[in-house]
Amino acid sequence: MKKTLVMTAMIAAMALTPANTWSKNRGVKDELTKTECGACHMVFQPRFLPAVSWTNIMSDLGNHFGEDATLDEETRIKIEAYLVKKARKKEFKKVIDGKQPIRITEIRWFKREHRREVSKRAMKRAGTMSNCVACHKGAERGQYDDD
Amino acid sequence: MKKILLVLSTAVMVALAAPAFAGAKQDAVMDHYKKLAKGSFSASRGKAFFGATHTGGKPATPSCTSCHTKSPANTGHTRANKPIAPMAFSKSPDRFGELKKVEKWFGRNCRSVLGRECTVQEKGDFLAFMFSQ
């Protein structure tokens, strides 16, 4: 009897937990990167951009998409190394102003995936297209299949 | 009875004499700026600085209030729409306790909003305002 109760409780707990809790965490695991990048925005997975994009982003933190996001040099180097190591292996065919894109939201597949997908209401809630977690609840764990 | 009165009045006097900042860590941060400053700090000057529209910074962030809202007691939002815990000390008592972190954010945000470093006076006034809230 006791066993049955415990089993029932366990099954209930599993059923009530969002699906992505059980799937593999494909999010950023580096604590420094999580803390520093995550202070202002969703911690984007490095696999979204090739290494050269991350190098370009991390060498211009004084003007980080319109804001000053300067880090001390030691921290900056560590985070850049992590992003470069985990970066997308292939560069994009389509360049922007002759360079690899630095805005994930400008990448062709990103635009295609979101075309006519985001309602006005959802956009208002998210505030910006770079706020992945507004719609993809598992985005920080690298889960984007819930749309 | 007399004793109780004495204890009570002492407590009131201590409370009145104590500075507006509660934590020892915050006191240490404030002391750092006090040592560098020529005069004293003013919460009302800090309030005016917080609410002002500045020029010289980046277009998206002309004021502290661009992200932190008009009141430091409110939750703010970054431009990427991530919530920012209130800056008012009464709401976020863990804030402003680590000089390195305080300096990091003054550095970034003063350059974003004013296009320059803040002066010691501005930083001290700003903190005095936050501790008074």
Image (tube, coloured by chain):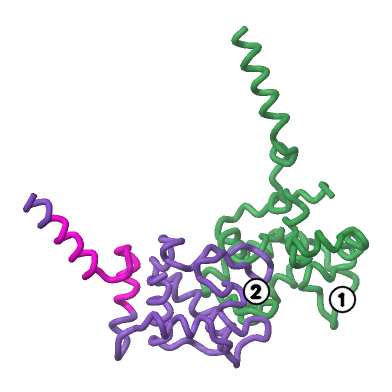
Chain colours: A green, B purple
Q: Residue furthest top?
A: A1
Amino acid on which disc 2 is placed: Met
Res. A21 image quadrant: top right
Rendering coords of residue B99 (x, y %): 39, 71
Q: Residues within 10 Å of mark 1 (few under 14, many from 20)?
A: few
- The answer to which of B122 and B28 lies nearer the viewer is B122
Residue at 56 percent of width and 85 percent of height = B111
Helix, strand or loop status at disc 1: loop
Look at mark 1 in the image and give the residue it sits on: A95
- The answer to which of B101 and A117 lies nearer the viewer is A117
Look at mark 2 in the image and give the residue it sits on: A58
What whole-number distance in Å separates the C-alpha atoms at marks 2 and 1?
19 Å
Q: Residue furthest left?
A: B2
Rendering coords of residue B27 (x, y %): 30, 69
Q: Report the quarter where the N terminus of chain A lies.
A: top right
Mark 2–mark 1 CB contact (< 8 Å): no
Q: Circle 1 marks a residue in which chain?
A: A
Look at the picture and state if A16 lies above or below A66. above
Q: Circle 2 marks a residue in which chain?
A: A
Res. A53 image quadrant: bottom right
Please determine if labels 2 and 1 lie on a single subunit: yes
Look at the picture and state if A53 lies above or below B34. above
Amino acid on which disc 1 is placed: Val
Residue at 66 percent of width and 60 percent of height = A43
Residue at 18 percent of width and 66 percent of height = B13
